[in-house]
Image (spheres, rainbow, N blue to C red):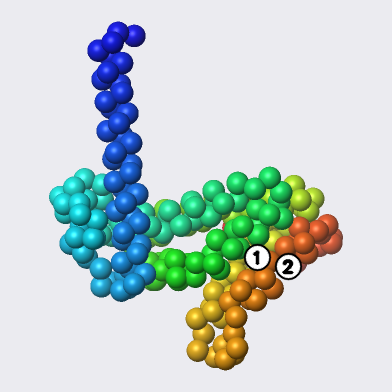
Amino acid sequence: MSLSQAVREERERRKRDAFQRRERDILMVAEQLMSEHGVRQVSVDAIAARTGIGKGTIYKHFDSKHDVLVALAVRHFEHLTVVLNQAPDPKQQLTDWIEAQLAEPRRSRLVHELLEVLESTPEAIALIRESRRRMRRRMAQIFGVSAAVKGAQATERAIWLEHMVQGALVEMRSPLRREDFDSDVLIESVVRVIPLVVSEAKKTTADDRMTYL
């Protein structure tokens, strides 16, 4: 490789890195603003002002605010999938996955708001659904290894645990929660189910199993 080629390649690498960093900054700021003010109240102009990045530059990354919303929702499930891959122990992987959502409930609630805004756009929902499906597949793999369950049984456990976390998030923001409600206690109680869901599964019939992912 000639020196000039090496210089060009290094320059291109730096451009790519800068582009990716700028995109991460845009999404981070968009998430912060939307968590504070609501999805519908935040414009591309507001994102540009907070990041200090020109509106035209933002449009080099995303064609519209709609694309920003899709990217935020997809990124949420991709992040949770990464969390599932970090710890070496299955119980810790699932514990980290739970805490990543319940320790930052505002982010999880934002995703639900994003889905409400995007629900009339089939293409966007399909992209987000696929990112969630990848997360569920990874959870099912963890159950397959740790609990010696495969296929529908592993998927059952993934979906059940996901719904349990969603229920905890609802409780966190419910006006009916107890006056002495403690979110840390709730998180601990959810985490305590991990040894149960990764234990040996009982035999079930095909009729007992959920068949969707």
Determine which residue is flagged by label 1. Answer: 161
Residue 90 vs residue 145, the one in the foreground: 90
Q: Which mark is residue 193?
A: 2
Establish if 136 lies above or below 172. Answer: above
Horizontal relation, residue 49 to residue 192: left or right? left
The disc labelled 1 sits on which kind of residue? Leu
The picture places residue 102, in percent across and down from the top left corner, at 55, 68
Disc 1 is placed on an element classified as helix
Residue drawn at x 60%, y 46% as measured from the top left:
85
Residue drawn at x 68%, y 54% as measured from the top left:
92
Horizontal relation, residue 176 to residue 188: left or right? left
Residue 213 vs residue 79, the one in the foreground: 79
Which image quadrant: the C terminus? Answer: bottom right
Residue 59 visible: no
The disc labelled 2 sits on which kind of residue? Val
The picture places residue 49, in percent across and down from the top left corner, at 19, 60
Comparing labels 2 and 1, the label whose residue is closer to the camera: 2
Residue 29 visible: yes
- Gap in Å between the C-alphas at discs 2 and 1? 9 Å
